[in-house]
Image (cartoon, grey):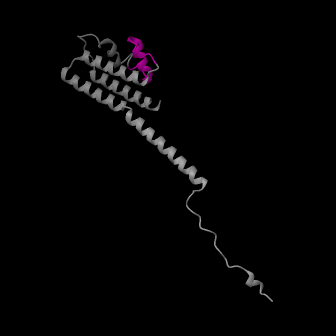
Amino acid sequence: MNDPLDQLKDIHLPPLVDWWPPAPGWWLLAVLVLVGLAWVILYLRRRAAKPDLRREAESELRQIESAWREHQDDARLAAELSALLRRIAISLYPETDVAGMTGEAWLRWLDGRMGEEAFEKGAGRALMESAYRPDATLDNPEMLVTLVRRWLERAVREGDHA
């Protein structure tokens, strides 16, 4: 009689799994990586193209302050600080009519961004009273520069989150 064990075939291994084509999960991962990489590249390109408003504002404020220390012209200081504030405000808040604001309305708007009344009732009032009088003298020019610096820092920081 035949031995039934002789009829068994030897163990054979399945064929090796090729690396190509990848499984669907790998395709999905590849697509997600490519989309993520494209997003990072676009983000970095936009960020590189966008001027650093904070650095530019600080640099210009330092230039204005150092020029004032040389010329000691308070009216010029007030006018330059007012122009700097207006340019930054127009850049950060294009939806408002900042360019057309003057006088008390301008000071109130600046105060509204700071949450205090430092422009309307404090050192910032000099922007309205001294900027266009050639013989103007400021009580405390350093305090005005410090106030403008605080406003710029707060506005640019809030503008980054907007």
Q: Is residue 1 left or right of residue 124?
A: right
- Residue in front for this viewpoint, 6 or 111: 6
Q: Which residues are magenta?
A: 96-118
Residue at point 56%, 59% (across, down): 20
In depth, the one of 154 and 147 nearer the eye is 154
Furthest-right residue in this view = 1
Pick the front one: 153 or 21: 21
- The residue sitting at 40% across, 29% down in the picture is 156
85 relative position to 159: left or right = left
Quadrant of residue 89 within the rendered picture: top left
Whether the magenta-drawn stretch holds residue 105 is answered as: yes
On screen, residue 88 above or below 52:
above
- Percent of width and height locating residue 19: 55, 61
Q: Quadrant of residue 119?
A: top left
Q: Quadrant of the N terminus?
A: bottom right
Give residue 103's position: percent from left, percent from top. 38, 11
Frontmost residue, 3 versus 111 = 3
User: Is 34 contained in the magenta span?
Assistant: no
Return the residue found at the far bottom. 1
Furthest-left residue in this view: 70
Q: Position of residue 69 (x, y in %)?
A: 21, 24
Q: Position of residue 130 (x, y in %)?
A: 29, 13
Q: Is residue 47 left or right of residue 20?
A: left
